[in-house]
Amino acid sequence: MFLDKLALTLAVVGGLNWGAIGLFNFDLVAFLCGGSGTWIARIVYTVVGLAALWCITLLFRSETTRSSHA
């Protein structure tokens, strides 16, 4: 399903951003959006967070549901 792939992609991007923060103290979203407190950065953080919540549903779906959408 398109929404599953989009959510997973956003969650991976968010995870990579957190990795960059942890390893290099560099927030790519804040860098690209002009700071972590800007409205655009807050929207990006919110969308990535919602995508991660959506990805939680992937853990609880049955195998038949996953294969029927492939």
Image: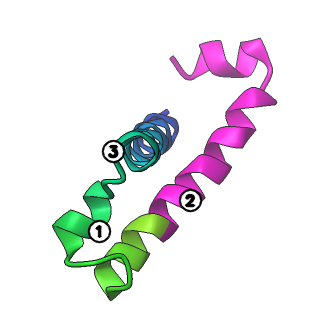
Asked if residue 31 is positioned above or below residue 25 in the image, the reply reads below
**Residue 22 percent across, percent down from the top left:** 46, 45
Q: How many C-alpha atoms fall within 10 Å of the one at disc 2: few (<14), some, or many (≥20)? A: some
**Residue 59 percent across, percent down from the top left:** 75, 28
SS class, disc 3: helix
Q: Is residue 26 left or right of residue 57?
A: left
Name the mark nearer the viewer: 2 or 3.
Answer: 3
Magenta stretch encompasses residue 38: no
Label 2 to label 3, Cα distance in Å?
21 Å
What number is the disc on residue 24?
A: 3
Q: Is residue 2 left or right of residue 51?
A: left
Q: How many marks?
A: 3
| Residue at left offset 40%, top offset 39% | 23
Magenta range is 46-70
Label 3 to label 1, Cα distance in Å?
14 Å
For the residues bearing labels 3 and 1, Cβ distance under 8 angstroms: no
Examine the residues drawn in magenta and state their main secondary structure: helix
**Residue 69 percent across, percent down from the top left:** 56, 23
Label 1 to label 2, Cα distance in Å?
15 Å
- Between 23 and 41, the one lying in front of the other is 23
**Residue 30 percent across, percent down from the top left:** 29, 68
Asked if residue 45 is positioned above or below residue 55 in the image, the reply reads below
Kind of residue indicated by mark 1: Ala
Name the mark nearer the viewer: 1 or 2.
Answer: 1
| Residue at left offset 68%, top offset 32% | 58
Look at mark 1 in the image and give the residue it sits on. Answer: 30
| Residue at left offset 44%, top offset 37% | 12
Magenta stretch encompasses residue 59: yes
Kind of residue indicated by mark 2: Gly
SS class, disc 2: helix
